[in-house]
Amino acid sequence: MNPVENEAVVAELLRSLEGSVELVEKRADLPGLKARPGWTSWRVMREERSRSRKQEKTHQKKKHQKRRKEWAKKCKQEEEESQQDPVVGEEKAKDESSGATPATGASDEAAAQMAKDGETPTAEEEAEEESRNVWKRDLGPPPSWDEETLRERAKGVGFKEFATYEDVPEEWRRKVRPSSFPPTPEEVAKFGLDKCMRCLPQDMNTGGFFVALFKKVAPLSAKAQERAKLLALENRPDAASDLDDETSPPATKMAKIEPTDAAMEDAAEVDSSETKSGLDTEMETADSKVNASGEDPAEADVVDDENTKKAPTGKPLLRGRGRTRGDMGNERFLNVDDALWGPLIEFYGLKPSFPRNQLMARACGDAKILYFISNSITSNLIDRGIQDRLTVINSGLKAFERNSKDCLVNYRVAQEGIHFVAPHMTKQKIVADPMDFVKCIAPGGIRLEATFTKEFTEKVRALAVGSFVVALNGYEMDIFKKMFLVMWRCRGDAINCLVAKVEMEGMRSKLRALGEVSITPDPPPRPEITKDPAEKEVSQDVPK
């Protein structure tokens, strides 16, 4: 939520477009949303350390290598001295056995020699080392949250504040730009940055979001277009040709006029000799345009047309991906085919209340993923043809994923959108008590009889092979807590948890926070599975 990455970007955009766009206030249309206003002033700071993280890692590596070499050299020197003078070796052994501290004369001489060679750290290097070590200490919360205390804390951990752009050193001006600083009082009154929305995690138990809605109120001026082009070229010099195509005025197209009957009769009465002379002139012109290689320009045009059709479409290439933005949204979001609905309703017992119009796929037929998209997106955007005007990269949550194993239905429930699907399921769903629920949160195959209660085991054995859902008792209809687990019923007497390891830890933390279990037990040990020829191993029955 750094204002340099949020409000400063919005202010620079409004400044560059010179009144062509304006911010729109939307809080009144979003009841229940807790959003704080955008900032109009902030402080610009930067780490005072001169080394980057990569350089710091290299420095630490070189420093340790240097210390190891010095230690090996010192040990070798002492060993040679003890071999040359047995008396010194015996005295050293006595000192080590008695715990006495050896003489420091040799080390002092070595330090003097290192200082002479310029290997000892200078005062500046020691100060820089101290500034680096401050990041490794746990400073704890500040004693006070007033502005002066926070400023001193930032200064103490290595940040330097800049009041204006002129205060920024030359070597840092590539990172700290003029647009990083707050707008002037006149710009604050003009831009209306308070219309931006800051959604903080502690306000609604969500992630952190910065929202700004722009409205175009006038065409872009020539000055604004040139400024945007220069800014783009500064960041991406390779996009010059794409920018020229985008900023150049569109070619004027001639209107197509349908010929009338009278015009057709007049054209039929054209003198044949005039037509013949025109054809001869065209043939002579075509013959004169054959290039030196003997290639007919007409044929060359055909080849160019074919190559043009094969060229990628869309905006400039995304960095490091080798594909265009157009390639990422070629497949539109479509309603799920009716042929898929019958097996899903039958296998999972989906109620009529399930919002079928909100389940979509990115391809017709046997799609890989079925997405659950909110009603506001489907009704306000997709149903109004937004995909005809914009490239939709992604939307919604994964509700179902295609199986890789044999099952009565081709799709299994996905953990990402389980809280929107499970409340509408009447089959392949089990309500478990907290202890059985916790035992389901384990990697690999989990044997039923050796792990769960008798009641839970009987419920699982009554299910069909494939995907099913375990809901925590008391939260089976709560979509906000999301106390659901996607499981897989194996052909053997075992189940498997289809939840990522990171989300497993999060589920255990939620159980402790809800007070359902005081201490979540460790995952149960996997009992040894005897290989039975009539039964395959559990690991072979888990979908990928």
Image: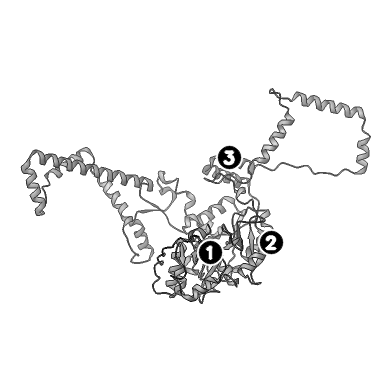
Is residue 87 rendered to the left or right of residue 397?
left
Sooner in the amino-acid sequence: mark 2 or mark 3: 3
Mark 3 crowdedness (10 Å alpha carbons): few <14, some 14-19, many ≥20:
some
Q: Residue 31: name its quadrant.
A: bottom right
Q: Which residue lies under the disc numbered 2?
A: 339
Q: Which residue lies under the disc numbered 3?
A: 240
Q: Residue 418: name its quadrant.
A: bottom right
Sooner in the amino-acid sequence: mark 1 or mark 2: 2
Mark 3 residue type? Ala
Q: Is residue 357 visible?
A: no
Which of the pair 393/121 is nearer the observer?
Answer: 393
Which of the pair 381/335 is nearer the observer?
Answer: 335
How far apart are the alpha carbons under marks 3 and 1? 60 Å
Question: Which secondary structure, mark 2?
Answer: helix
Which of the pair 75/284 is nearer the observer?
Answer: 75
Question: Which secondary structure, mark 3?
Answer: helix
Sooner in the amino-acid sequence: mark 3 or mark 1: 3
**In the current view of this chain or complex, which residue is farthest to the front?**
533
Question: Which secondary structure, mark 1?
Answer: loop
**In the current view of this chain or complex, which residue is farthest to the left?**
87
Mark 1 crowdedness (10 Å alpha carbons): few <14, some 14-19, many ≥20:
some
Q: Is residue 158 visible?
A: yes
Mark 2 crowdedness (10 Å alpha carbons): few <14, some 14-19, many ≥20:
few
How far apart are the alpha carbons under marks 2 and 3? 48 Å
Q: Which residue lies under the disc numbered 1?
A: 491
Mark 1 residue type? Arg
